[in-house]
Image (cartoon, grey):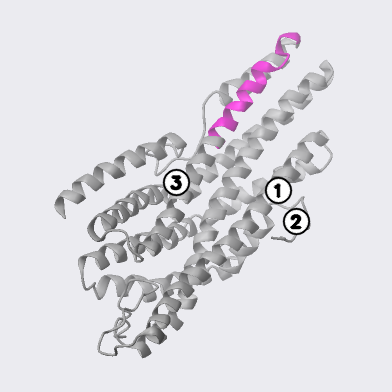
Amino acid sequence: MVLPKLQDPYIVMPLLLRLQRFVGLWGDRRYRYKFRLAFASFCILVVIPKVAFGYPDLDTTIRGTAELIFEWNVLFGMLLFSFKLDVYDEMVNLFMELANLVFSGQVRSELGSYLMHINHRIDKFSKIYCCSHFCLATFYWVAPLSSTYSAYLSAHNESIPVEHVLHLEEELYWLKNRVSLTDYSIFTVIMLPTIFMLAFFGGLKLLTIFSNVKYCSAMLRLVAMRIQLTDQLEENSVERELIEIIKMHQKALRCVELLEMSFRWVFLGQFIQCVLIWCSLVLYIAVTGVSAKVVNVGILFILLTVETYGFCYFGTDLTSESLSVARAVTDSLWYRRSVSVQMKLRMVLQRAQKPVGISAGKFCFVDVEQFGNMAKMSYSFYIVLKDQF
């Protein structure tokens, strides 16, 4: 697969910001209504039909509930994020300010090369993920459609009803999409923009979090690299460089603080809903067995699991990079420096020894260890639910 190359490696997250601007989550405040319209259409086409019109049996109820949890996780997470857009704007502007500093020639070229590498990696990952998300959305829309119509074409006994495989398990208001082919066709047409809207916001949510967490990690890594490079400086230049490093470190920590403020409630909702959909899928398989109907729910399970693990992995990476600043100080030639320089290095060390990261609603850090705790919790909930059913 050939992807378009990053045109300007000096720009901060160009693809992500372009996608956010398209739906009013970045840029001019006048266009923020775009996301509100998208969220309203989601409620009209998905939430209200699923909640108000019910399901015909237990296995359909479990599947529909799992779908609602996944879809709500996507749009509700972006809704929580939309309440913090001013905080997010400040963070991105700080990223741009630090990037301009790195690329301005005022610091060593090694820092600029590293940030260009990060920009290329983020851009490549974003484009690959967008393409894969588009393919998944296309499959998610085509598979039920082809299955249902091929069943009609191959049916030999008209007295036996054909099962309609729905894109989303719901009664869309007064459409008889489970029994009427005409209503099912109307339902299919309506599901086309709905599914691609869900896919777009699902991908945008993941890219928003992954890219910004990675950029915060990169800013902390740049601070550590800059400290390491002070060993090559003369004594009269080190003190001036350390003053600039302290300022840069403060800005990087401010980025992490703004990141945590922007996404803390998004992560909390992600954790809760991930546990719920894990339980729903396992319970669905336990009740109905392995069948073709499990495929759609299985796709949701895989997407949400990969997404949640990715959040935890990058959260661990962020904490590790924050501690790398402290390691850079202790590994430097501080013992050869003057008392004044040592005092400044001590200031950086004291702040860097306190690990930073992103939390889920201020309750717990988002890291790989927490992902394991969630898996254990999900199994405990499943045992309780299994006894009830």
Q: Earlier in the sequence, mark 1 or mark 2?
A: 2
Tag shown at residue 264: 3
What residue type is disc 1 on? Asn
Q: Position of residue 253 (x, y in %)?
A: 59, 36
Q: Position of residue 201 (x, y in %)?
A: 51, 63
Q: Does the magenta segment cover residue 326?
A: yes
Q: Does the magenta segment cover residue 340?
A: no
Viewer-side residue, 242 vs 133: 133
Q: Position of residue 27 (x, y in %)?
A: 62, 63
Looking at the magenta stretch, what is its main secondary structure?
helix
Q: Earlier in the sequence, mark 3 or mark 1?
A: 1
Quick one: which residue is furthest to the left in this view?
388
The vertical placement of 162 against 307, above or below, is: below
Q: Quadrant of residue 151?
A: bottom left
| Residues at circles 1 and 2 in contact by the CB criterion of under 8 Å | yes
Viewer-side residue, 47 vs 363: 47
Q: Assess disc 1: are there few (<14), some (14-19) or many (≥20) residues with their C-alpha within 10 Å of its C-alpha.
A: many
Quarter of the figure that contains the C terminus: bottom left
Viewer-side residue, 345 vs 209: 209
Q: Is residue 145 left or right of residue 125?
A: left
Would you say residue 202 is visible in this rendering? yes
Nearer mark to the viewer, of 3 and 2: 2
Identify the secondary structure beneath mark 1: helix
